[in-house]
Each structure stands twice: as structure tokens, then as C-alpha cells.
Amino acid sequence: MEMVASLFNSDNYTAVKKMMDVSALRHASIASNLANVSTPGYKRVDLSRSFEDELRASIKSRNADEIAEASPRTEVDTLTPSTRADGNNVQIDSELLGLTKNTMNFNVLTDFASGSLKQLRHAIMGRPA
Amino acid sequence: MMNVISASSITGSALDAEKMRVDIVSQNIANANTTKGTDGKPYQRRIVAFESLLDAASGPNMQGVRVSEIKRDENPGEIINNPQHPHADDDGNVTMPNVNIPFEMVDMVTATRSYEANLAVVRNARQMATQALSIGR
């Protein structure tokens, strides 16, 4: 039992779970940005920079509790300048690039999560599942 | 995972709005030569205005989109002299609708590209959901 608990509470596994949440939130932000690509005055939404710093620091600490505590949040990005007359600062191509990148990231994370669970099953069955 | 599924309401609203924009463009093009509309006057070009609306279900800051209003373009249309036209006035002048075909085509292409971008979001959301469901397999 000790081994199972340590697998699910490991810093890597906790970090992967957290980053999947982050990935889902980033996806929702990109969905919002692409939905409003033609809305006058809309400002793009992105993950909060302070959260990204917080997450980076918590992963570096390799402390599972600290990683689990970081709460993903978004902020309105008013720093990216608008190149359009209507004040909208969404760039459709960079959002699409971010969308593809985010989906790929998510695939890597699910593969890692699957890998951890497969190892556990391997250990239980005594042979590859 | 709730986020991936609920973002689909945002994308859905955008697909609706962009579809409406294409519908209005097709209405404008269809009526590019309508000199007598239902109100008896030459057809006036319709303009779609978008507004964002907060989608609280998808989280803070997340915004969907909707068509806030469909306005008429009040600019006067071109007046051409064509005495044979059934709608010509006593001087033989006909007021044409204020529809500008190249402008409508540009609007149509823009709306189509935005629609495709939102479809890409749906595709990616589905892929992510499928991946998440197959964790451990």
C-alpha cells in the first residue's frame, strides 16, 4: 500500500495533474479569444503571469503539497498592443498556434499519467498489461 | 476537465454569431439590385454588430460572443439614370441599394476564416477530452 500511495502523492504525478488543469484553462482562454476575434474592444484572456511564476516555483521545490496548492487563474491581457482600429488585440494566427501547442502539451501530460498507471498495473500483474 | 467541456459553450456562441454574419452577407449580396424592398424603398445594406458576454460557467474572464444588433446602413445608394427601369422616377433616375459587392466578399471571407478557427477549437477540445478519457489505458 505504501508504494501505491507514494505513486499517487509523488511530486511528478501531482504536477502532471495540476498541469492538465492549467492546460484545460488555457484551452478555455484560447476558445474565448477566438470566439471574440471580431468583437470590437475585446482584450485577450491568458493565464495569469503571477500564477505561472507560482507554478514554476512550486514545481522547482518538488513539494507535492505546494504544487497541489497552486490555483490556476486567468487575467485580461491589456499589455499586448492592438494593431486594429477597433482596439481588439487578438491575433488569430498566434491563438491558433497556441491552441495546437496546448493540445500537444495535453497529450504529453496524459501519456505521462497513463505511463504511471501502467507501471502500477505492471507491478500488480507481474507482467506488462 | 469541466473547463474543456464548458468552453464549448463559448465556441458554440461564436459559431452561431459568425454563421449569422455570413447569413447577413448573403442577404446583402442577394439584394444588391433590389430597388424596391418590403418598405417600398431601395434595399439598405445590413451590418452585424458583435458584443462579448461573460460566460461565468467557463470561469472568470471567459467571454462568449453574440450578435448585439443588426443595423441598416443609412448611407444613400448610387443614383443611376435608366428611364426603362420600372422603378425609375419621373426624371428617369433609379436609386440603387447601397450594397458594395467587394466589401461584402471581404466580410464573407473574414467570417469564414473566423468560423474555421472556432471549428479548430472544437477539434482540439474533442481530442483533449478523448485523451483524458483514455488515461490509464
Image (spheres, grey):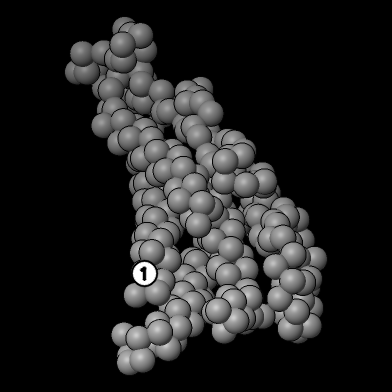
One can see residue B16 in this view? yes
Crowd around label 1: few <14 · some 14–19 · many ≥20 (10 Å): few
Which residue appears at 33% of the width and 92% of the height? Answer: A127
Residue in the foreground of this view, choosing between B96 and B93: B96
Q: Please give the chain letter of the residue carrying mark 1.
A: B
Residue A64, percent across and down?
71, 76
Residue in the foreground of this view, choosing between B118 and A128: A128
Residue in the foreground of this view, choosing between B12 and A55: A55
Classify residue B89 as left or right of residue B1. left
Residue B118, percent across and down?
42, 54
Q: How many marks?
A: 1
Residue A115, percent across and down?
44, 83
Which residue appears at 79% of the width and 78% of the height? Answer: A57
Q: Is residue A38 above or below residue A95?
A: above
Residue B25, percent across and down?
36, 37
Q: Amino acid at mark 1?
A: Ser
Residue in the foreground of this view, choosing between A6 and A108: A6
Quadrant containing the N terminus of chain A is bottom right
Quadrant containing the C terminus of chain A is bottom left
Classify residue A106 as left or right of residue B106. right
Which residue appears at 35% of the width and 9% of the height? Answer: B39
Instruction: Report helix, strand or loop for mark 1.
Output: loop
Q: Is residue B19 above or below residue B126?
A: above
Q: Is residue B110 above or below residue B36?
A: below
**Where is residue B33, by image quadrant?**
top left
Q: Is residue B13 above or below residue B94?
A: below
One can see residue B104 in this view? no
Of all residues, the one furthest to the bottom in this rendering is A127
**Mark 1 sits on what residue?**
B134
